[in-house]
Each structure stands twice: as structure tokens, then as C-alpha cells.
Image: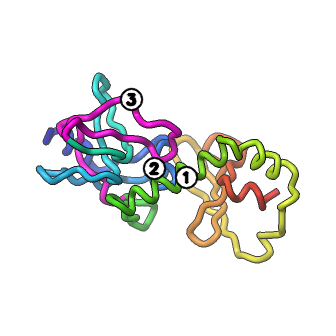
């Protein structure tokens, strides 16, 4: 297991993928600390290797007990299908380096609450309220001149695959145009207000 931890902590290892957004973002540099015999807590964000796979994943612990550890990505609508043993887990994500700042990654009870709130927003977007939500977004009936009230900033990020544009209000990214695309991805709740 020690060799896995060293590999995960190697400089230049960055988070990729959508499963832990918005807590983690593509390009975040992860600081992973091993558990070293300490209890794995529900709500922790962990780096692990699923049974029968070679790549490492980053998801949140949703259950931990004698039967093993269950995980789920905050952005995923379903639990992961596997049960992990402690030896499968390289460590807990303590922080993420995002540009010039370091973001602390919550674990335990506060991590569980954060993961739950992300899942609730996903269920609103995709579940029973999804058709109503999408109709409101298309109608523009709720649209207000939000950008007149706030001072948005546009951030340009140079990535290996091209330039990414992000529109920020304060520190919150409300929409982005990923590198290599010309489309804008608006955060779910902001779709109601931005047309």
C-alpha cells in the first residue's frame, strides 16, 4: 500500500473527471494523506483502487464498517457497485491545489452534508422536478438581469488541450466553456436566471 500512496502523492497528479464536481474540479492537485490505521469516516473523500481495476478513483465514503467501505461520487446518482477493504484505499484527500489557492476538502459529518446537497441538486435536475426545471430554463420566465447586480469576472485557463473560459461571480464558477469546445456549461441553478 505504501507504494500506492507515494504514487498518488507524486507532484503533478491532478484530479480528472466529473464524479466529484463541484467539490473537486478537473486539474485540481490533490494532497492525499494515508489513514495509517485510523478509522475511515463516512463523508471522507478517498483515493482508492476498485477491485479488479488498475486505475485509482476519487469518491466520497458513504458507509464504513466491518463489512467494508462503500463509496459514491458526489455527482453520481447511484452508489458505487463495489465494497472496498481498507487496503484498497490509498488515503484521504485533505486538500486540493486550485490555481494559486489551496482548498480544504471536508470529510466526516460536514463532508456527508456537502455530498448530500450536491446529490439533491442532481436529483432536482434529473428527477421528478427535472421536467419542470428544464421547462423553466427554456421559457426564460424566471430570467432576470442578474449580471447588472453583480460584477462577474471572466477567467481564462490555459490547459494542455486548449483554453478554458469560466464566468465567476465572487469565487463561484457559474458557467464554463471547457477547453476544445465552443459551448457553455451553465451550473444548474444559474440556468433559471441566465439566458
Q: Is residue 21 magenta?
A: no
Q: Is 194 situated above or below 53? A: below
Q: Which residue is mark 1?
A: 158
In the depicted structure, whether residue 117 falls above or below residue 49: below
Give the label, 2 or 3, closer to the camera. Answer: 3
N-terminal of the two: label 2 or label 1? 2
Residue that sits furthest to the top in the current view: 52
> Which numbered disc, 3 or 1, marks the residue that appears first in the sequence?
3
> Which of the two residues, 108 or 1, is positioned nearer the viewer here?
108
The correct choice, above or below, for 12 with respect to 192 in the image is above
Q: Which residues make up the magenta segment?
A: 66-95
Q: Give the mark, 2 or 3, whose residue is nearer the N terminus.
A: 2
In the image, is residue 85 part of the stretch drawn in magenta? yes
SS class of the residue under badge 2? loop
In front: mark 2 or mark 1?
2
Q: Which image quarter is the C terminus in? A: bottom right
Q: Residues within 10 Å of mark 2 (few under 14, many from 20)?
A: some
> Which residue sits at x=56%, y=51%?
120
Amino acid at each position: 500500500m505504501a507504494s500506492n500512496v507515494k504514487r498518488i502523492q507524486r507532484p503533478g497528479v491532478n484530479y480528472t473527471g466529473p464524479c466529484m464536481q463541484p467539490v473537486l474540479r478537473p486539474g485540481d492537485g490533490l494532497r492525499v494523506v494515508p489513514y495509517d490505521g485510523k478509522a475511515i469516516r463516512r463523508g471522507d473523500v478517498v483515493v482508492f483502487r476498485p477491485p479488479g481495476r488498475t486505475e485509482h478513483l476519487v469518491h466520497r465514503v458513504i458507509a464504513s464498517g466491518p463489512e467494508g467501505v462503500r463509496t459514491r461520487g458526489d455527482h453520481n446518482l447511484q452508489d458505487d457497485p463495489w465494497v472496498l477493504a481498507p487496503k484498497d484505499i490509498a488515503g484521504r484527500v485533505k486538500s486540493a491545489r486550485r490555481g494559486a489557492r489551496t482548498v480544504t476538502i471536508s470529510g466526516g459529518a460536514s463532508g456527508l452534508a456537502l455530498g448530500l446537497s450536491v446529490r439533491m441538486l442532481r436529483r432536482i435536475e434529473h428527477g421528478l422536478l427535472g421536467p419542470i426545471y428544464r421547462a423553466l430554463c427554456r421559457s426564460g420566465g424566471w430570467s432576470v438581469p442578474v449580471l447588472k447586480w453583480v460584477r462577474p469576472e471572466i477567467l481564462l485557463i490555459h490547459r494542455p488541450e486548449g483554453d478554458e473560459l469560466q464566468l465567476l461571480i465572487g469565487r463561484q464558477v457559474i458557467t464554463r466553456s471547457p477547453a476544445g469546445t465552443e459551448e457553455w456549461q451553465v451550473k444548474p441553478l444559474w440556468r433559471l436566471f441566465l439566458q
